[in-house]
């Protein structure tokens, strides 16, 4: 495991603010601040806009998994950037 690691577990935007570039600004901030870090980001498989945004910024799919909470199953993708 690399020494310098950042995890993005969830970024949630209220529906009325979607499509205004908020997630892009947050991701850009994290990438600028933690430029030399390995960055992991967990995204729901159905969140196509977030997946496309991460791929645009060079994130690669690492693996897929199921997250179980309150008898609900969410299918997730773990993305990574700058992994040594």
Image: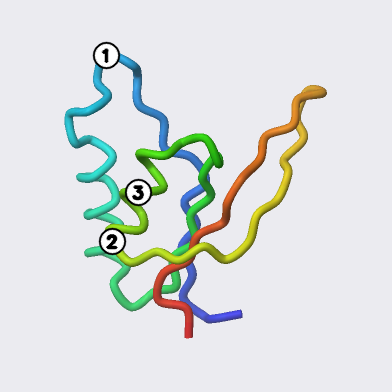
Q: How crowded is mark 3: few (under 14 residues within 10 Å), some or many (20 or more)?
A: few
Asked if residue 76 is positioned above or below residue 83 in the image, the reply reads above
Side (left or right) of 81 relative to 64: left
> Disc 2 marks which residue?
57
Pointer 2 or 1: first along the chain: 1
> Disc 1 marks which residue?
16
Pointer 3 or 2: first along the chain: 3
Asked if disc 1 and disc 3 are in contact, CB closer than 8 Å, the reply is no
Residue at position x 58%, y 51% from top?
77
Measured from the top left, where is residue 83 in percent x and y? Answer: 47, 78
Asked if disc 3 and disc 2 are in contact, CB closer than 8 Å, the reply is no
Q: Which residue lies furthest to the right in this view?
A: 71
Per the image, label 1 sits on a secondary structure element best described as: helix
Residue at position x 35%, y 58% from top?
55
Task: State which quadrant residue 71 falls in.
Answer: top right
Measured from the top left, where is residue 19 in percent x and y? Answer: 22, 28
Asked if disc 2 and disc 1 are in contact, CB closer than 8 Å, the reply is no
> Disc 3 marks which residue?
52
């Amino acid at each position: 495991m690399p020494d310098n690691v950042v995890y993005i577990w969830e970024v949630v935007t209220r529906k009325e603010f979607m499509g205004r570039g908020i997630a892009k600004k947050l991701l850009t901030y994290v990438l600028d601040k933690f430029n030399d870090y390995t960055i992991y980001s967990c995204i729901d498989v159905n969140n196509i806009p977030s997946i496309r945004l991460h791929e645009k910024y060079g994130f690669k799919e690492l693996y897929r998994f199921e997250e179980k909470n309150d008898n609900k199953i969410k299918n997730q993708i773990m993305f990574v950037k700058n992994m040594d």
